[in-house]
Image: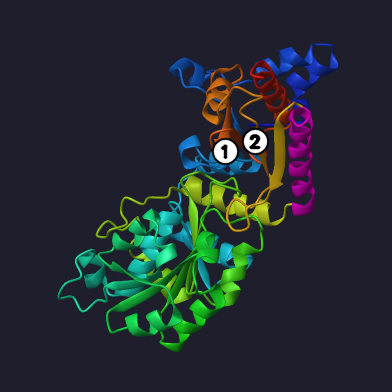
């Protein structure tokens, strides 16, 4: 959605509307004239809300920037060859993220499937057609992963027909590697829970000539993570596009070795003889993802971080003076690395559970979503809020907590 300032600027660039503004027509009337013709969410009865919880998929991730929407709308005006567009955009993205090659995928999950598929088949079209049936094909069939890193999203890897082999130590890795090992997979958000860190994982893979991959789906910011793991030597890296980068929610990036990306492309549309046919990315999403990445990398991240800190400080300053309230600003170290306000309270002084507070905020006008924080608490982030919404959230939190005071 356009910001008020940008919309004013754009309106003033049109002779008719600019004339209206200059001739004393109220700004609200001019803005209304440029508003969408249909409020589809209201028309369909779909609840919208202020997002104080973060870039959660079930909450539709993030909101795209104006520039991304412009790229998407532009892409819808012309035809092009999908492979040529992916070629050109991939070259640009690869330079931005320090990888040999890159491709826009339908999310990080599909990037994992496609990357592993490319490793399994190489450029052999017969093998491409055979996935996910690996038996008697000569293809490898095992992925090594630390036990702490084996989460539900690794289904993206088993979609290829491979199985996961869990390990815990470097010695376990040495024992697990065999002629069936196709990949060694790493999960950044759980890095601190495993016994083998990034550099050692890559070194083990190189020692045995086994490709290594890393899932960093929700792990920017910091922006440097977009190239940190490519520079480190991982064979391929996947990241979500619809979270912090605020690209299309259904897009992501697969970055890595040129041979792996080229083979992964054989498993993607427009080809239809592969396991990735359903992982379609349209030209509009490819352009939108490219523009989102470019904008994200060129953002003043220090300034953006300061705005998040200011928003959190405003909410904290509004609720902290209430009796029985304790607050703490926490920054998750791995994923969703942004300032998060933890609000906790004494159950003897505030007769309200964390779920009760979430429900009351959800049922209010405007509706607000915040994160769960245990029996007597909630967590609040501001990085997915529109400017000024932190004030609304602060006011509503104070209202509900005050009403529940014993």
Q: Residue at x 33, y 67 (%)?
A: 117
Above or below residue 69? Residue 252 is below
Above or below residue 185? Residue 283 is above
Magenta segment, which residues? 300-321
Residue 68 part of the magenta-drawn span:
no
Residue 309 part of the magenta-drawn span:
yes
| Picture coordinates of residue 92, whole percent (x, y) | 59, 63
Which circle's residue, 2 or 1, is located before the other in the chain?
Answer: 2
The residue pinned by badge 1 equals 373
Above or below residue 176? Residue 351 is above
Residue 282's disc is none
Mark 1: few/some/many CA within 10 Å (<14, 14-19, 20+): some
**Secondary structure at numbered mark 2:** strand
138 vs 276, left or right, is left
| Picture coordinates of residue 164, whole percent (x, y) | 31, 67
Q: Is residue 268 visible?
A: no
Query: Which of the two residues, 71 or 143, is positioned nearer the viewer here?
Result: 143
The residue pinned by badge 2 equals 344
Query: Which of the two residues, 312 or 147, is positioned nearer the viewer here?
Result: 147
CB under 8 Å between callouts 2 and 1? yes
| Picture coordinates of residue 340, whole percent (x, y) | 66, 44
């Amino acid at each position: 959605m356009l910001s008020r300032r940008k919309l004013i600027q754009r309106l003033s660039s049109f002779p008719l509307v600019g004339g209206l503004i200059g001739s004393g027509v109220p700004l609200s009337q001019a803005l209304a004239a440029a508003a969408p013709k249909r409020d589809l969410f209201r028309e369909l009865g779909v609840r919208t809300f202020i997002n104080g919880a973060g870039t959660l998929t079930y909450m539709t991730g993030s909101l795209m920037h104006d520039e991304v929407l412009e790229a998407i709308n532009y892409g819808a005006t012309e035809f092009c060859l999908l492979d040529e567009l992916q070629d050109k955009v991939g070259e640009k993205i690869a330079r931005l993220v320090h990888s040999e090659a890159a491709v826009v995928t339908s999310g990080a999950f599909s990037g994992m499937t496609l990357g592993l598929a490319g490793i399994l088949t190489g450029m052999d079209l017969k093998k491409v057609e055979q996935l996910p049936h690996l038996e008697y094909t000569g293809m490898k069939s095992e992925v090594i992963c630390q036990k702490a890193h084996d989460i539900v999203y690794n289904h993206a890897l088993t979609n290829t027909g491979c199985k996961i082999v869990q390990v815990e130590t470097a010695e376990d890795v040495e024992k697990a590697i065999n002629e069936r090992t196709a990949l060694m997979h790493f999960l950044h958000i759980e890095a601190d829970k495993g016994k083998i860190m990034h550099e050692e994982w890559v070194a083990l893979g190189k020692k045995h000539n086994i490709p290594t991959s890393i899932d960093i789906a929700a792990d920017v910011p910091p922006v440097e993570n977009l190239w940190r793991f490519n520079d480190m030597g991982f064979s391929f890296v996947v990241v979500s596009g619809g979270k912090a980068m605020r690209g299309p929610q259904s897009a992501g990036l697969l970055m890595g070795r040129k041979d792996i990306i080229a083979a992964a492309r054989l498993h993607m549309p427009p080809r239809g003889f592969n396991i990735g046919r359903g992982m379609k990315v349209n030209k509009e999403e490819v352009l939108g993802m490219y523009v989102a990445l470019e904008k994200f990398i060129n953002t003043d991240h220090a300034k953006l971080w300061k705005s998040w800190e200011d928003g959190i400080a405003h909410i904290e300053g509004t609720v902290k003076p209430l009796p029985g309230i304790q607050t703490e600003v926490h920054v998750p170290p791995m994923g969703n690395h942004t300032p998060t306000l933890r609000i906790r309270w004494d159950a003897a002084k505030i007769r309200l559970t964390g779920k009760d507070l979430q429900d009351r905020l959800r049922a209010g006008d405007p509706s607000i979503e915040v994160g769960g924080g245990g029996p007597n608490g909630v967590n609040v982030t501001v990085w997915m809020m529109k400017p000024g919404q932190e004030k609304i959230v602060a006011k509503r939190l104070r209202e509900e907590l005050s009403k529940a005071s014993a």
